[in-house]
Image: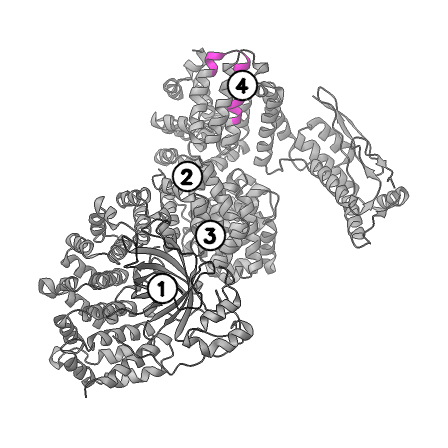
Amino acid sequence: MNFCTLGRYRGGLSLKLGRSGSNSGLDLVVLPLQDTFNYIAATSIMSTSKKVITREDWEKKLNDAKIRKEDMNKLVMNFLVTEGYVEAAEKFRMESGTEPDIDLTTITDRMAVKKAVQCGNVEDAIEKVNDLNPEILDTNPQLFFHLQQQRLIELIRNGKVEEALEFAQEELAPRGEENQSFLEELERTVALLAFEDVSNCPVGELLDISQRLKTASEVNAAILTSQSHEKDPKLPSLLKMLIWAQNQLDEKATFPRIKNFSTAALEDPSI
Amino acid sequence: MPVRVVDNTQIPQVSGVNSGYTLSPCTLLSVGQAFAGTQNVSSIQKEEAWRVNVRIQGCDLDHGYLCGTMEALNVPLAETPVVTFWEGEIVDNKNYTFFTGKWDAKPDNDVRHWSKFQSFSPLQNQVEADGGKSLDLSNYPYIFMRWKELYFVNVGKDCGLTIAGFYYVCFSCSDGSINGFYYDPNSRLAICCPISSINVGDDPYSCEGTTSSHGTAQSSTCC
Amino acid sequence: MPSSAACKRPENLVEGLSSKDPGTRLKALRDLKNQIIGNRTKKLRYVKLGAVPLVSEMLESGSESVVLVQAIATLGSFGCGLDAGVEAIVKSGALPYLFSTLANPDEKVVEAGARSLRMIFQSKLTPKYNILEDKEMDFLFSLLNSENETVTELAASIIMHSCETTEEQKALCGSGVLDKLALLLEGSSNQRDASLDSLASVVKNNREVVSKFVGLHNGKVLSSVNGLTKDRSPRTRLLACSLLIALGRACPSQLQDIESKADLVRILVELVEEPGRAGDEAPRALGDLIEKSEEVQKLACSVNAVEKLCKFLHKGSIQAKPLAGILHALAELCSNLEDNRRLFLSLQGLPLVAEMLNHESVGVRIAACICIRNISRSVKNLSDGLTDKSIVIPLIHLFDDPSIEVQVAALGATSNILVHFTTHKSIVFECGGVKQLVKLSSSMVSELRVNAVSALRNLMFQADKMCKENIMLELTISTLASLICDPEPFVQEHALVLLRNLVNGNVDCINYVFAEDGLIINAVTRQVWNASSVGICIQGIYVLANIAAGDEFHKEEVMRILFPLPEDGRNQSILIKFLQDSSSPKLRVATLWCIINLSHLDSPGAVDRIARIRGAGITCAIKIMVNDPCLDPKVLGPSLGAIGDNWPK
């Protein structure tokens, strides 16, 4: 899966990112937060009737908000690096001159691990993580269990019933003894073996591709943490903040809202 | 054996600070101390009395807390002595004031009961004025308390006795005598009558000076 | 069975480690590493098969980098979270070789070496790094100054592991460690965490170092630590809180205002619910913070700390260390406030804590005992099932625990429970508890003696005559007499209270005091005259007061002791001295009680005794007590004076 296009800024307000492949593109919209908060503060001391902010006023205010381009670039770089888009990060570094806050070569290793899990080569992934930093799985019992569980799932997926049972007994059962919640998860996983038609069984979701993605992102986060890097990109939390801020403001004022986050279009206030 | 009560009682000064003080420790009111006396139950129809033994089981002056057991002997119709466990609130103006504020006791009930104690009279005006919150009781030779029985220790609830009410209690630090009045708003017993009076037993000194205040959990020396 | 599993049989793999063929060896090493990482069971198996020395050998023989990195990582994993692994590593002599890898020209080897050593230094079994030696200190600072992040983190871990004494703290501080660690606070998040962690051990209980740290860069470092309590990473928040708590414990003025304490309480209680290490360690930090402060305990309760911690207990399957932390926090929450105890009991926490008394971990057993001890401080709660067999019997079993600390804690809890009025003291007899208490009361360990005698004292409290006699049958007169003169003052005091409880309210029991040539009374007399503390003296006087409540013979014996003849060579005016002791109102009161009982008019010899007491000039001392600053002697003195007026002239 490759990153392929990088959208241009629109007036410093919104940023579009997309990628091709089986997953649909993810669009992000970023608003100048500082300005939004100012609005809340301003309206909160006004009368109780909702203040109306026209589109014109709003856009003017937005344009007045100074956002340093370097800061925006850093946010982009943070996203690319955290999510592991090493080529795009490299390209973006050359285009914008923004230095990544992490050694780009480590991204390649991290992505190799992530990819191995996504493809179902869990054993390979585990060995790669251990080469990268043996502490990660030694100090993260939960992650280690989830990887082993994923290994079991892959064995079951491939119909290797006998091997699966042996593996569950040998590797996973001792972990279950150490931790009650592991035991419950193990029982759920082994239950897969009891159904002939797994696509129709209550624990069938374990075989879903989303389970691989879940495990892969857990490994990704753990590697990032071990590298002193935040495990989540900053952009999604900014988006959440935007939604929160809009809702807060909505109680006090009528204003041009962003409803469609993929286009970031301002919608006229309805009066 | 009768003990003369000290008469040179000083009236507590109004302290001006309303945070209250922890009362001074009193050997007669410490864990393990036992008391014996009688409880009078009077109503319009009849008067009854039974012997009572009280023992202090726990005492925490910092929190204005006291607890213990009360054993009623020769209770009519009861086959065995009846033992109850009670907890006490010590009026120290820090943890508790003269006003009960619960158990269906209104301020006028409170004042009516407290004023039955002679030792309360020097305080009455102040209590009526501001609830007595500004009184420094820490060195007053009488300790006022409310004792509330919580459960029967050795008999079932169907023993024909009630513990729905509570006692207004006055303890004398100098001779260890305890007097109390029972108040139960739901009982048909006349609330104004002195219902309980517990006095120090026959030979106070051989037991009072003796039990261990160190036998308590609170003073336990564990790490 | 799949073939891949067969060739990974542990025995074969270990064989491969000593293969002549380098390729086979490396493959076996890699396989071993990948098998043991994250897997305790396998680590233990391979330790038993002797894999550790074989891997250590590969370090010694100057292998090439690829092999070195694998061997180092494998050792690190053996040392991670497994005491047996650390032991094997230390025994194999690998530590010096691991340290030498830090000077390897290959950065990958250095990185691996630093990581492994860091894991190994997490264990208590790893020998202490000798900070006080100049050469070692220099090396430590060279690590702190390293360009490599992991190496600096290692240095911080070593400090955390090995800095324990005031001397070591001073030495580190003198070499400028505070500045270095402050610098690391500005580094990567891992460096920051390592620095916070080791700072806590450098400042621990050391007021001097604390004041240096607080003043660092005009307080800027301190305020950055304050800022870190709101960091995005839960672990950083926890470590920053722990450091602030350590500062406050060493120097209370550092953590004085209730606002900052409230902040810490809020942050820590929130952290309790965080998954992973931060959540695991938060309860212990919370417990440390609220220790001894009712005010802070109230705060913690107001943000539902008791509910949250109990929820975890109910959920079960918690690792030993976090479990001990949760119990520690609950114990502190229940240490002073009745409301908290009541809440804890209503949440059905007690049966779970009782179960923990049998836990395999020493730390959990201790914490469970302390928790029960604190809950049983309230007499009312004792009647709510604390005296249940399900608690008393396991506690008594712990008297035999291999760990002395557990024994001490179990005695403490039992001691409190025995106070209660409904305790069937017979349970303790039935399961041989008294025998064990007596045995422990002559232990070589003074803490055990103190707590065992304290438990016996509470067992004696309000006991009936038969119970008292049974205790004395086990304890014996000579042991009690020697406990009264024990080298440990607390044992002396508890033994005197035990005696005071024994002779209370029962004339027959007073006779123990005079049996066997007066062994006990002689010991008491010695203590009253030569007590090392006023507390001991008070208890001695109360013993005499209780004896004086006995019959005519008893009273006369007390008179003989308190009013010695001049030829006895003892201070004749000791009672006056005690009555006038301005330092202890309790001693004055105890003495008054003694005189009250001696002069009790109902007994035939009273008139004579009163004359002797008067002859000793005590009347005057008693009359002065009208002006005593303390209420208790003030009201008792005059009441005796009143009796005194009726004394026959």
Span of residues in magenta: A146-164
Q: How many marks?
A: 4
**Which secondary structure is most common in the magenta stretch?**
helix
Q: Give a yes or no on whether discs 1 and 3 share a subunit.
A: no
**Residue C499 position within the rendered picture, expressed as x and y whole percent measured from the top left:** 21, 62
Q: Amino acid at mark 2?
A: Ala
Q: Residue at x 47, y 29 (%)?
A: C38
- Mark 1: few/some/many CA within 10 Å (<14, 14-19, 20+): few
Q: Quadrant of residue C389?
A: top left
Up-down relation of residue C569 to residue C98 (above or below): below
The circle drawn on residue B46 is: 1
**Residue B90 position within the rendered picture, expressed as x and y whole percent measured from the top left:** 43, 66
Q: CA distance from mark 1 to mark 3?
A: 45 Å
Q: Nearer the viewer, mark 1 or mark 3?
A: 1
Disc 2 target residue = C320
Earlier-in-chain disc, 3 versus 2: 2
- Secondary structure of the residue carrying tag 2 is helix
- Position of residue C552 in the picture relative to residue C463 (left or right): left
- Position of residue A223 in the picture relative to residue B181 (left or right): right
- Mark 3: few/some/many CA within 10 Å (<14, 14-19, 20+): many
Q: Residue at x 69, y 28 (%)?
A: A85
Q: Amino acid at mark 4?
A: Ile
Q: CA distance from mark 1 to mark 2?
A: 65 Å
Any part of residue C132 in sight? yes
Disc 3 target residue = C340
Q: Nearer the viewer, mark 4 or mark 3?
A: 3
Q: Give a yes or no on whether discs 4 and 3 share a subunit.
A: no
- Mark 4: few/some/many CA within 10 Å (<14, 14-19, 20+): many
Chain of the residue under the numbered disc 3 shown in the image: C
Q: Give a yes or no on whether discs 2 and 4 share a subunit.
A: no
Disc 4 target residue = A153
- Position of residue C585 in the picture relative to residue C286 (left or right): left
